[in-house]
Image: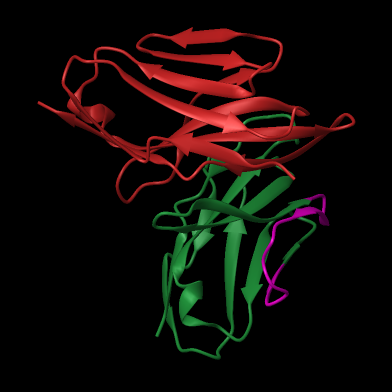
Amino acid sequence: KAGVTQTPRYLIKTRGQQVTLSCSPISGHRSVSWYQQTPGQGLQFLFEYFSETQRNKGNFPGRFSGRQFSNSRSEMNVSTLELGDSALYLCASRSSPNTEAFFGQGTRLTVV
Amino acid sequence: GENVEQHPSTLSVQEGDSAVIKCTYSDSASNYFPWYKQELGKRPQLIIDIRSNVGEKKDQRIAVTLNKTAKHFSLHITETQPEDSAVYFCAARMNYGGSQGNLIFGKGTKLSVKP
């Protein structure tokens, strides 16, 4: 069974640009969550999608948005990039809200 | 909302010694507490979890204890080995009236096991 796949693995963007990250969950998993990981701040929750609906949202500005498609794949978009958005972005999938979350390898975003 | 505090932020032990990492959570509605291990450059992986109806769970050298009254839970690693060196994250998940919420993570503990 393939694991959670995130693309791209690495990304370099310029301030002011926008970026779209992709997450393909484990087959059969309908829940996808996104996290931002920075040194010293741990894993900060961005949002969670289940069956194409956003269920929960963390405390991030409106520049961070996401969506989920009917095949459960999810995308995360960050507009008007800032230097502080440089981080490892991780997604995690679950088969249902009450089960273990499996993480992808992450997308390393660098904003210059 | 839920808030999870994790201590210590760094921990250095000698091979063979025990390591203990502690977390506290704020919302008494939380009912699921997983621990993740993240090795350098790799994804976080679940190593053990505990639900609120259990006080302790053990898996070989790893154990987790939960004190619901005090709202804290701990990870215990015995007979540590160099391959245990990693960043460990605790997390808590709330139960919204039967609907499971998102995981809220602590800031992590960097464990170094010296040979």
Q: Using the image as rendered, state which of residue B27 and residue A101 is in the foreground.
A: B27
Q: Using the image as rendered, state which of residue B8 and residue A38 is in the foreground.
A: B8
Q: Is residue A7 left or right of residue A40?
A: right
Q: Number of numbered discs present?
A: 0
Give x and y (percent) for residue B107.
47, 45
Q: Residue furthest right?
A: B97
Quarter holding the N terminus of chain B is: top right
Magenta extent: A50-65
Q: Is residue A112 above or below residue B112?
A: below
Give x and y (percent) for residue B91.
57, 35
User: Residue at coordinates 69% horizontally, 17% vertically from top-left?
Assistant: B52
Q: Is residue B75 left or right of residue B103?
A: left
Q: Residue furthest left?
A: B115
Apparent colour of chain B: red
Q: Is there any visible trace of residue A102 in the rendered image?
A: yes
User: Residue at coordinates 66% horizontally, 51% vertically from top-left?
Assistant: A33
